Amino acid sequence: MVLLLATLIDRLVGDPDWLWRRWPHPVVWFGALIGAADRGLNRPSLSFAGRRTLGIVSILALAGLALGAGLLIQRALAPIGWAGLLVEALVASVFLAQKSLGDHVEAVRAALEREGLEAGRRAVSMIVGRDPNELDEAGVCRAAIESLAENASDGVVAPWLALALFGLPGLLVYKMVNTADSMIGHRSERHLAFGWGAARLDDVLNLVPARLTALLFAGMAWMGRNGTAGRKAWKTAWRDAATHRSPNAGWPEAAMAGALGLSLGGPRRYGALVVDAPCLGAEGRREANPQDIAAALRLFGWSMNALLAVAVLGSLVSLV
């Protein structure tokens, strides 16, 4: 029931700006803890091995704190019955991102169609780290679709699956690790050693969700578009996912590329750094357009409907 309620709340309400302008989002609290660990323990004077060891200890301790918080919240809410379930679902919904992800990607499509390239660049800069000023319209569209595919996995499917399998404690552990990966899991000089543990643990936690997301995209493409699109989505994911620099992100991105007949990925710029990444679905079109963003959002929506259907079924089974 918590899973179903949280899924519905996230789908209908998302992340209301009026609330988080007045109160720090819980992920901000997680970030503060991660930042404190980074500042206090990631000392340049230590050896590489020492910093990596402290990084591993830090992420395990932070995950333990998240686990403990989830267990305490569950225990505190258990005595108040249905009201407790509703509050737990409200807390859980904060860590899902279905509506906010869809809204941000839709904003890119709308900006391109209504105001042109510069507005599209501004909108896409909210969801990607690459330099938007280097992107033409097709590049903006590809960036939005790639972000939608990747974040569908680690922003929606992965936390949803953690909640489904391990309840609120599992969800909080996942979000702590994922937040740590985004903050310190980089191959920069400062974080190559200290962030190694967070990056590797995040990779492990996303192994199943990334592949499940690719399977969802392929299945929904088969049902909603045509059988050819579904087969192409899975074939592209199976063939090209391993070429991605991430062991997980390539799965949903390649599946999305195959489903839409696009070529995603490829070289990209992050400030002064140029990443020479391979293309996913190299035989597809590079000239993506706002209509392709709309098609990607429809596929994302169908996939989220599948998760909702599973949550409904699970709640019915729990009531029997």
Image: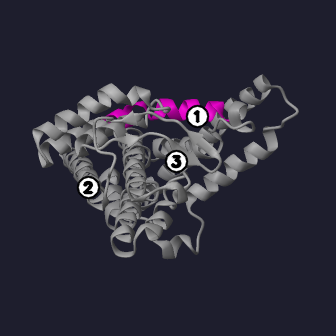
Residue 13 in view of the camera: no
Q: CA distance from mark 2 to mark 3?
A: 29 Å
Amino acid beneath label 3 = Gly
Left/right placement of residue 313 relative to residue 25 reads: left
Q: Residues within 10 Å of mark 1 (few under 14, many from 20)?
A: many
Q: Amino acid at mark 1?
A: Ala
Q: Which residue is mark 1?
A: 199
**Distance in Å between CA atoms under marks 2 and 1:** 29 Å
Q: In terms of secondary structure, where does tag 2 sit?
A: helix
- Tell me which numbered mark, 3 or 1, is placed earlier along the sequence: 3
Residue 22 appears at what percent x and percent y?
A: 58, 75
| In the image, residue 151 lies in the stretch drawn in magenta | no
Q: Residue 300 location in percent, x, y?
A: 28, 52
Observer-side mark, 3 or 1, equals 1
Instruction: Indicate left or right for 314 with 41 as reference.
Output: left
Q: Are marks 2 and 1 in contact (CB under 8 Å)?
A: no
Where disc 3 sits, the SS reads: helix
Query: Residue at the location (35% across, 29% down)?
Result: 240
Sequence-wise, which precedes: disc 2 or disc 3?
A: 3
Give, as a single range, the part of the protein colored magenta: 195-212
What residue is shown with label 2?
A: 301
Quadrant that contains the C terminus: top left
Q: Which amino acid, by three-letter code, is at mark 2?
A: Gly
Front residue of this view, candidates 94 and 5: 94
Circle 2 Cα neighbour tier, 10 Å, few/some/many (<14 / 14–19 / ≥20): some
